[in-house]
Image: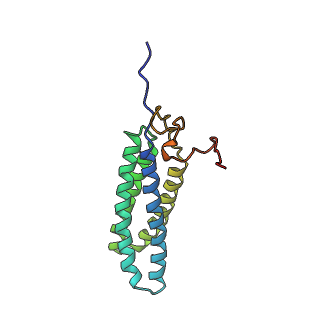
Amino acid sequence: MSSPPVAPAPRWPLILLRATATAPAVLALLQTVLAAGFLNGHYEALAMHAAGATALAAVAVCQLVAGVLVRWPGRGPRWPLGVSALLTAAVMLQIGLGYNRALGLHVVLGVLLVSGTLFALVGAWRQPLPVRPPAPAGAGGPEDADGAGLLPRPGGHVGVAP
């Protein structure tokens, strides 16, 4: 008695995770620059820091959705879901601390938040993508005579026309 063949895991949830892990990392680093600008006396940077926090919260929620998609339809690891949930909660707490002017906790959590987003970024990009299944005959794969306008895959034979 053999079990039915398991379909390969889809690639798109991990690609989405990579995109949604990159955006908060960039925004978190931008937040440090805006906070430093405010502390250096550029008071207009505070409004931009608040807008950046809103954007960071939005992409953190998107990253949480990507973590769910990696785990369930993507049959991927659990850590993206846990890390994304933790980062989303930390961003929400961070926004509350900032608006309540609890600056001691706000700065400490901000350092941890930047570290966490960079950890998630590295983890997302180190997660290998599932191998693509071979294309069926006639679907534009390498066995098609005309190549269907596709570029050759790396490592394959590349012919040069005279």
Say if 123 sits above or below 37 in the image. above
Q: Nearer the viewer, residue 15 or 79?
A: 15
Dividing the picture into quarters, in which one does residue 38 lie? bottom left
Say if 6 sits above or below 20 in the image. above
Residue found 39% across the figure and 84% down from its top = 44
Q: Nearer the viewer, residue 101 or 144?
A: 144
Give coordinates of residue 2: x percent, y percent: 44, 16
Dividing the picture into quarters, in which one does residue 11 lie? top left
Give coordinates of residue 124: x percent, y percent: 50, 50
Say if 77 sits above or below 39 in the image. above
Give coordinates of residue 141: x percent, y percent: 50, 38
Quadrant of the snapshot with the N terminus: top left
Say if 47 sits above or below 162 in the image. below
Q: Residue furthest top?
A: 1
Residue found 41% across the figure and 74% down from its top = 103
Q: Residue furthest front?
A: 162
Drawn side of residue 11 relative to residue 100, left or right: right
Give coordinates of residue 9: x percent, y percent: 44, 37
